[in-house]
Image (cartoon, helix red, strand yellow):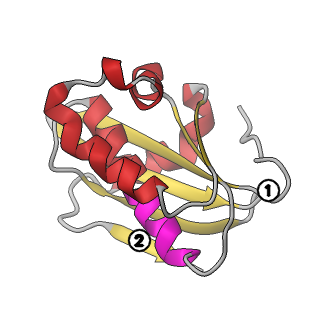
Amino acid sequence: MDWEPPPCGWLKFNVAGVSLDERVGCGGVLRYEKGVVSALFSGNCAVRGLEMVVLMAIIVAIEMFTSLFHKVQLPLIIEFDLNTVLNWLKYRSLRPWSLRKLFVKIEDGCRHIDEIQFAVTFHKKNGMEETLAKADMSRKNFFKAAW
């Protein structure tokens, strides 16, 4: 499966969460419409459950995006592979009460972005992000890079 570029003028942050043998990690890659990588992150997450890991990846993606582009207003798409998380983001009534603090962080971060969309992608299209998440699950600190 090939990565699909965002619409012209948009950026896309693909994020993924993985859970293997009681260890969890997440990763993400920010790209421009031509596929050029602008930033990436990966690391261990101190949460349980794949949905929580994806929510943490979304939070990290929003924080990185807002710190990189705080002086310019660019639209962003955050893409991941869990329908459950997309439904939670779209419909507040479906959100688990136990995860309310994560949703508050996401909503606060979204206020600093001109326009944001969340989308679900086919699992195989998030290959690079999933590889980053798997590679750094044993890392104590997050790896973040931007250029």
**Which circle marks residue 95 in the picture?**
none
Q: Secondary structure at mark 1?
A: loop
52 magenta-colored:
no
| Picture quadrant where residue 103 is located | top left
Residue bearing the label numbered 1: 33
Q: Quadrant of the C terminus?
A: bottom right
Locate the N terminus and report the quarter of the image it occupies. top right
Inspect this view and state whether residue 21 appears. no
As helix, strand or loop, the secondary structure at mark 2 comes to: strand
Most frequent secondary structure within the magenta stretch:
helix
Residue type at numbered disc 1: Glu
Query: 41 and 100: which one is in front?
Result: 100
Q: CA distance from mark 2 to mark 1?
A: 21 Å
Q: Which residues are magenta?
A: 59-69
Residue 88 lies, with reference to residue 36, above or below; the image says: above
Nearest to the observer: residue 130 or residue 39: 39
Q: Is residue 50 left or right of residue 118?
A: left
Q: Residue at x 39, y 48 (%)?
A: 107
Residue receiving disc 2: 144
- x and y percent of residue 139 in the render? 22, 62
Tell me the crowding category of disc 2: few under 14, some 14 to 19, or many 20 or more residues within 10 angstroms, Cα based. Answer: some
Q: Amino acid at mark 2?
A: Lys
Q: Are marks 2 and 1 in contact (CB under 8 Å)?
A: no
Could you tell whether 67 is left or right of 53 in the image? right
